[in-house]
Every structure is written in structure tokens, then in C-alpha cells.
Image (tube, rainbow, N blue to C red):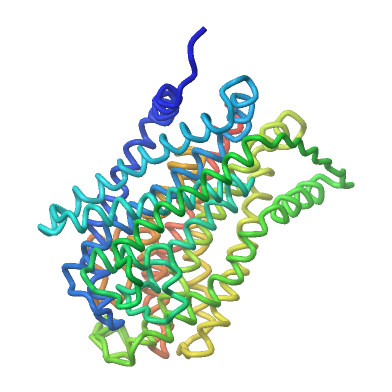
Amino acid sequence: MTTITVPRLSRRWVAEYARRPLNVVLLIVVPVVFVTLSAGALADFADILGGDAALGEVEAATAGWAAAVLAGVAAFFQVSQSRDADRRLASAGAGAVRVVAARLASALVLAVAASTGALVALGVRTDLAGSTRVAGATVLSAVIYTGLGVMVGSSVRSEMNGSLIIVFAWIFDVFFGPAMGGTAIALRLFPLHFPTLVITGVASGHSSPLGDVGVSVAWAIGSISLAAFALVATTRRHLLSIRSARRSTTRLRAALAAAGRQLRRMPVLWILIVGLPIVFISASIAVTPEDPTPVDLVEHGQRTLTIQSMADVHGAVMVPITIGFLASLAGLFVILDSAQADRRLTLTDYRPGEILTVRMITIAVATLIATAVGLAVTARSFDADNWWLFALANVIVGLTYATIGVIVGPIFGRLGGLYLLLLLPFIDIGLAQNAMFDAAPPTWGRYLPAYGAMRVLMDAAFTPGFDEIGALVVSLLWLSVLTALAAFVFRRVMTR
């Protein structure tokens, strides 16, 4: 009989992860792309918000940020997708402690891989990647979020809810951290607070005798220790849940009722759809100075650079950034969470087109609610020149990225899809179309999905007339093509 050891289990689980080469590629590529494309923009943004670190040091911090979120998400899926198998393995004689140790070891291997990709990309931009301080703090950031991913994976059954918790905890951790000028005492409790200070070389002055490095190490040890305790507890637990379904009188009503039950099982999604725009948009506007910034606009057929308040520009673009993230993840998980049930429906008299229509209605409702909340929040501090057109542009952005989520899910799976959706909306809406970083989108940004809708949005935000008719047509074409592609992908998945 083969002896079950921790190294043997760890190697087997890392090999199992590698059976989907795309996941391995994305684990390396996503931090490389994130650091390469975003480091300069985030450094400039941190300078605008009053961060204390030099621009090059903020660029270095992006390596730790990228490694952290990738490691956290990878650890979450490692645990959530293997929960039942790990319990059976522990019951079969391997023991909970041995299984947990092997699972944590395999998750840490993925954390090192993500850190390596981020540091390699950073090395292309700056010599700081070779610094022991930067490399060590980057790995610590990944380890801290590995522990967070394991804790969430061991306690949250829904992959949608769990991954959203990690992703949006990371968003607040980064954008309200010390590199972005976050100085409130409560912000010191964020996991990446001290590692970011170590990378940027800014002394906190509030790290106790341990120092910033010592507190960062303590965070990593504490995170992994709590993760181990949580995972041992759930690995020993054997629970079986049975869900019942009801029948409705009509096909559409029955399908929509099922979709409603599906959404009720995603409480974290609804908390974020309502809570994230309120907190994230309000805080972003509050910390942005009123400094003037140029914005490329068209009025009466003439394209000119106009000077706008930076706070107003930030208020305008934060709504589609937030909605794009939420809508894309809603599209990804609503489709994937209902995939098995949808395949069973195709064996009855439901057609794939009917099923997709119901799913898209579900996703659209979530997108519209997030849009309404985001508009209500930004309206407190920002007044668009044309609110109806501004709202329409935000809806188009949301539906566009919701449809991208529908496409990405079946092709790349949950983990690969989440990796991509951490990157695509950020690069497109957060960087390329963001007037905070450049008055007009770069040439390559014109070929991204949100380009047309964002041009309409900026026109509606800052000019009384409407001159971006061509951009509106482009945005609707993008939405139409993506919807057709989503229908094609969905039909292929349902007929496998």
C-alpha cells in the first residue's frame, strides 16, 4: 500500500492544478500584464492622492498587489473545489492534519509562482525587483492572501460569494492603502498595509517594536495559522445539504423563479452590488483633490481639450469601473453556477435560447441595480450635464462586461475566468478609458469593448450637447457582437 505523505499529496495537487495549462499560464501572465500595464498609472494615481512613496516605489508595490490577489483566488479555488474530496481522503486514513498540511503546501507553491511572475514583470520596469526588501514583501503579500483564500474557501460554499469576498477585500486593501494616501487608523488593519509600506520604503511609525517587516511576517504567519485551523475544522466535518425545488405553472415563470432562487443563494453578490458602489465611489471621490485635469471632449463637432476638476472626472469614471467589475463577475458565476441545471433543462422541452434569455435577464437585473446604486452615490458629489445619457452609457458598459463574463466562464472555467476578469475591466475601463490618467484614450484603447460607451459617458458628463453618435454606434455594435458570441458559446456548452 502506498504511504500517504504530505509531499506526495502536495505534488499530486499541484500536478492536478497544472492539468489545465491555461490556469498555470494565467497565474503567471496576469501578474505580468498587471504590473507591466498598470504600474506607471497606479504610481501617478498614488501621487495625485497624496501618497508618501516615490513613483518608482509605488510601481514596485504593484508586484505585491498582483501576487496577493492571484494567490488568494488560487488558494480559494484549491480549497472550495476539493472540500468533499479532502474530507473523504481524511476519513480514509490520511487524517485531517496531513491533508490540510498538503493542501496549504500546494497553495503556497501557487503563491510563489504568482510572486515570481509579478517580480519578473517588475524587473523589466525597475531595478527594485532585485531588492531583497521588495522580493520578500511581495512573497509575504502572496502568503497573507493565500491564508485569506483558504479561510474563505473553508467557510463559504458558494464559489461566487467566496471569490467576490477576496477580490473586493483586495480592491479596498490596495486603493485605500498607504501607497494611495490612506492614513486612517482603521486602515492599518488591512492585510497589505505593512507589506506595502515595506515595499515602498516608507516607515509607518506605528508598527510597535516588531517594525514594519516584523508585523508583515506576523500577518503572514497569523494568516496561514488561522487558515490551517479553519481548514482542519471543515475537513473533519461531514454535512450533506438537500435542496428542494418547486414547480411553477408556466415555463418562463418557472425558469425565472429558479433564477430568483439562484440569486438568493448569492448574498455576497447582493451585498457587494449595493455596498461596493456606496463605499468605493464615495471614498474615491472624497480622497480626490479638486485639481484641474485635461479631458478630450467633442462639442459642436469640434474636438478640444477642456479643463475639468479631477474630483469630477473621478466621480464620472468610478461608476463604470465599479459596474464593469460587478457585472462581469455576475455574468461569469450566474452562468457557471447554473450550468448543470441548464443542461438538465435542455433534456426537457426548454431550448438553449430560452434558458440563456432567463440567465441574461437575471444578470441584467443585477447589473441595473448596481448601476442605479452607483448613479445615486455619485450624484451626491457630481452633476452630469446629461444624466439620462450618462446613465445609458453606464448601463451599456455593465451589459457589455456582463456578456463578456458569460463568454469567459464556459471557455476558461471558474478560476481562469476569474483571473481574466480581474484584468480585462481594469485594463479597459480603469486604465485605457480613464481620463484621470490621459486626456484621451491611447490608440490601442480604441479597440477595447468599453471605448464607445466611455466616450458617450464622458460626453454626457461634461458637455450639454451630444456629439459622440459614432461612439454610441460602436458601443452597441460591441454589445450586439458579444451577445451573439455569448449565445453561440452557451449553445455549444448546452449541447456537449
Q: Is residue 305 above or below residue 317?
A: below
Q: Could you say which quadrant of the image residue 454 lies in?
A: bottom left
Visible residue check, residue 406: no
Q: Residue at x 48, y 10 (%)?
A: 2
Residue furthest top as drawn: 1
Q: Residue at x 43, y 86 (%)?
A: 286
Q: Is residue 453 above or below residue 229?
A: below
Residue furthest right as drawn: 249
- Is 67 positioned to the left or the right of 2 in the image? left
- Is 157 positioned to the left or the right of 150 in the image? right
Q: Position of residue 106 (x, y in %)?
A: 41, 34
Which image quarter holds the C terminus? top right
Q: Is residue 66 above or below residue 12?
A: below
Residue furthest left as drawn: 127
Q: Could you say which quadrant of the image residue 27 lies in?
A: top left
Q: Position of residue 109 (x, y in %)?
A: 35, 37
